[in-house]
Image: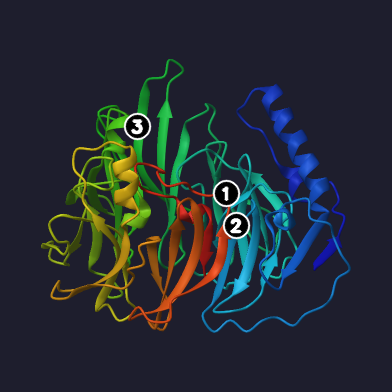
Amino acid sequence: MVTRICTRRTPGGTMGRIESQGRSGGRGIAVLCLFGLLTLIAGCQAVQIEAGLKRPAELTATAVAQRPTPTPTPVAPLGWLAFIRGGDLYVQALPDGPAQRLTTDGRTHSPRWSPSGEWLAFQKEPRFLWVGRRAGTDQRPVDLLDPVREPVAWSPTADRLAYISRGGLYLVSAAGGERRELVPPSAREGTGVMALAWSPDGQWIAFERLERQADGRVTLQGLWRVRADGTETREVYRNPDPFQTQSHLAGWSPDGRSLLFWQGWQLSASLLADGAPLMRVPVDGGTPVEIVPRTLVFSDFLAWAPDGQTLAVVEGGGRMTWEAKAITVVRPDGRRQRLSENGRADLFPAWSPDGRWLAVTSGPELPGEAGGERVRQTLAERRIWLIAADGSVRRPLTADARFRDERPQWSRDGQFLLFARLQGERAQIWLMRADGADQRPVVDELTPSPGWFGSYGHLAWDRLYAWW
């Protein structure tokens, strides 16, 4: 059944304040016109409560609205799941609540939960940032995002969003109100703020910055941090030769004393795709130190332990995720311990809440292959494994040859694991107990499918679902 709620917003709202600073006039007008259209569309929102499996045609953005039937808010003992089906956003209480449809245009991806679980940020093609309540109300467009690695992030302590647009850095509350400009927009496309990350206490936002001259020559690249209230900006690390080396922001240490970054070379995306050293630099400035010599530039290849001092990393260079990839644990004193076995390629480390175990995606290694049928068959053998934090125990949790299993995530109580499954190119989400028992699907379809190859075997699951 479908609930259709229509509201009208005045032109003086958030959209009326969108600017196009530092850009050509034609492009600015085009962006404003497109946002004006979105503002009109935003006045009509649809909510669908799904009681069971529906045919694909019933799940598209053209589903016909029906009379609303009020239902109580489901209890969610294992939290809430936001996921994409048919290009639309759904939410569902775990473990077995009904799915509730929040969008109907077929253009939605990349859901992100606010810390309270009351709000969701999501993107609509091509790159529009939206926010809305979990209940499906108060949906509104925010701004046009830049095409950078991760252009938006919630504060860890409050329901407010930091995002990157037109090379600038902005802050906005989920409930609305004036946006705050923390870093001014850039005068040149492809420059300005390139990545962001909140400090653990929500007081600072670190950002990666790149500046070029009119002839394309790089004049500045490095890491900065700005207070969330906009009162202070500090330089953390500036590359001495911004063309030869670059600092690509990976995040904060849990104690808030360091920033992590991947070190790139010569502004080369190809070199970066084959991995980079993972570095650490004090937030008050200083000399960067190496954590591991090579890892791929994926945030889900890094995981801090609950103690806030031990880091699990997928170590290994080369863009093929089925070759030379091992889980390495970096201790507080800098010692590194390899937990993966020879002949295995392990990915997506996730710590148990008590810090005793790592859940990982593990599959056979296939050296010397860049793609093709042998690679597809090898990736189909990926399973969810448990590894003791000291490496003393290693055992599989899933073993169904029909599926490829990836991206394990722990429930807050450590009793359950959520994971993604592929059968061919059909993507699903499953839940099981931490010992591998009681495996069952909770979402039967994620679409559009991520395919089987992705970025050399790395699939961007965060475009398709998020768990709160």
Q: Which residue lies under the disc numbered 2?
A: 84
Q: Which residue lies under the disc numbered 1?
A: 448
C-alpha gap between disc 2 and disc 3:
29 Å
- The residue depicted at 74 percent of the width and 40 percent of the height is 35
Asked which quadrant contains residue 2, the reply is: bottom right
Classify 240 as above or below 429: above
- The foreground one among 195 and 301 is 301
- The residue depicted at 45 percent of the width and 40 percent of the height is 194
- Dot 1 and dot 2 residues touching (CB under 8 Å): yes
The residue furthest top is 215
- The foreground one among 296 and 250 is 296
- The residue depicted at 89 percent of the width and 68 percent of the height is 67
Residue 7 in sight from this viewpoint: yes
C-alpha gap between disc 1 and disc 2:
8 Å
The picture places residue 285, in percent across and down from the top left corner, at 27, 50
Q: Amino acid at mark 2?
A: Ile
Q: Earlier in the sequence, mark 3 or mark 1?
A: 3
For this view, does 178 lie left or right of residue 212? right
Q: Amino acid at mark 3?
A: Ala
Q: For the N terminus, which image quadrant?
A: bottom right
Residue at disc 2, secondary structure: strand
Q: Earlier in the sequence, mark 1 or mark 2?
A: 2
Q: Which residue lies under the disc numbered 3?
A: 269
Residue at disc 3, secondary structure: helix
Question: Dot 3 surroundings within 10 Å: few (below 14), some, or many (20 or more)?
Answer: few
